[in-house]
Image (cartoon, rainbow, N blue to C red):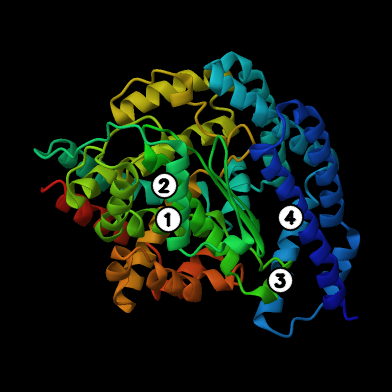
Amino acid sequence: MTAYQELLAFQRDTEALSHVAERTGWDQETIMPRGAAASRAEEMAALESVLHARRTDPRIEDWLARAEAATPAEARILDLVGRSYNRATRIPARLASELARLTSLSQGIWAEARANEDPSAFLPTLEEVVRLKREEAECLSEGDLYDALLDDYEPGASARSVAAIFDKMRPRLVALRERVLGADYTPPVLDHVFPEATQLRIAKICASAFGYDWTRGRLDLSVHPFTSGAGDDVRITTRVVESDPFNCFYSTIHEVGHACYEQGVIPDYAFTPLGRGVSMGVHESQSRIYENQLGRSAAFTGWLYQRMVDAFGDFGIATAEAFHACVNRVNPGFIRTEADELHYNLHIMMRFDLERALIAGKLEVADLEEAWNARFEADFGVKVDLPSHGFLQDVHWPVGLFGYFPTYALGNVYAGCLDRAMRAEVSGIDAALAEGSAKPATDWLREKLQRHGGLRPPRETIEAACGFAPSEAPLLDYLEAKFSTIYRL
């Protein structure tokens, strides 16, 4: 075999083992018995040790030096393998194993502390997670520690570039929010009990409407909804609150966006670095456009309204128009995953600032709850009432995903660009959504973006799909048009 073929064969086994590790994580968050947490942490640490050894195998350096790419895809594979090798060799095996063990344990400790509203039971563990992530960042950094962690999730981005985008977004978001909250019109709210089994049945119908391939996936319940897997095994989770079916429906549609990206990558890329979504920002562009521009559109909510009437009878919303306003109601609530489109990015901006301060050592874990509550009240005008409504609500910090949060807002920006380009090229999107089918939109997204996997860097992926460089303007224009209509401004 040539050096490239030897490297690719080695890489396929590494990718397959990483899928096994990911499946083990899925099991932990869905069906693993609670008493297995300690043993699972050891299993995750052992898997990470094997993966780290493979990612730092000295033969990779030799193969990279001798390999020749015959196509752009092969050149991109070599680039991504080299990038992974360069990062992995900077991290000691001991640290990689410790992080895997601790973040596996931390997840269970966080979930219990969250359920019991007991921050003190979790803070010592979080302090240790932050200490190890700072150490990891120091191993990887060539400047800003936070940039080193952000690069894991959005290659090419930096704290400075993200902050610049947020600085442009915040004034228009805040101004629109003030206009909306001051409007004479107030959308109705749900006041009904929606049984779990019926919610899950409708959630599965929604998943099918957006093209989720059930022969290569499944839906389960978890504390925090997520997507796991790639290629022929891509699983999603959701959660159910019987007073709020939108939590279930839109969490499901959001995760289907992630899943369809993974299911949509062309099979030739399977078990290579091209066989996954290229970044979390691009991944979030898929979940957010499915959830918001498509799933919260008047066309789709009109279809969903009829499904809910059929399933639940009279649940207090008289018309499809009122239902659309209810789905998109603007409210400065506590929970990020339940936030409306105006407040969502403000949630992300707050977390971005706090986690940058944590990694830089400017904020200590012991002071995090107080800092969170003060910032939340300043940004949202509401005092946090419970830790589970505050800094304990998200799973990201417990499992060490520092640098992940800004990709949600980048995903919103990218989704705004994709929506503008897609609607300029494709007719009949809303007509299909009104019939319960997202196919014209999802076909365009699959052809323009999803099938290419990791072939191009993140911003190039968006630009190739849209035909123009990404910016925040399309998203902000979309939000202003949408909420001006709903709130009759």
Mark before the other along the chain sequence, 4 or 2:
4
Residue type, mark 4 in image: His
Residue 19, numbered label: 4
Is 43 placed left or right of 111 in the picture? right
> Which image quarter: residue 129?
top right
Q: Nearer the viewer, residue 309 or 270?
A: 309
**Which residue is denoted by mark 2 in the rendering?**
249
Q: Residue at x 65, y 31 (%)?
A: 107
**Which residue is denoted by mark 1 in the rendering?**
206
Mark before the other along the chain sequence, 4 or 3:
4
Tell us which disc is closer to us: 4 or 3: 4
Q: Residue at x 13, y 36 (%)?
A: 182
Q: Quick one: SS at disc 2?
A: helix
Q: Is residue 41 visible?
A: yes
* Outermost bottom residue: 70
Q: Are marks 2 and 3 in contact (CB under 8 Å)?
A: no
Residue type, mark 1 in image: Cys
Separation of marks 4 and 2 at Cα, in angstroms = 27 Å
Residue 77, numbered label: 3
Residue 144, placed above or below residue 82: above
Tell us which disc is closer to us: 3 or 1: 1
Residue 476, placed above or below residue 275: above
Figure quadrant of the N terminus: bottom right
> Which image quarter: residue 92?
top right
Q: Is residue 349 visible?
A: no
Q: Residue at x 54, y 25 (%)?
A: 363
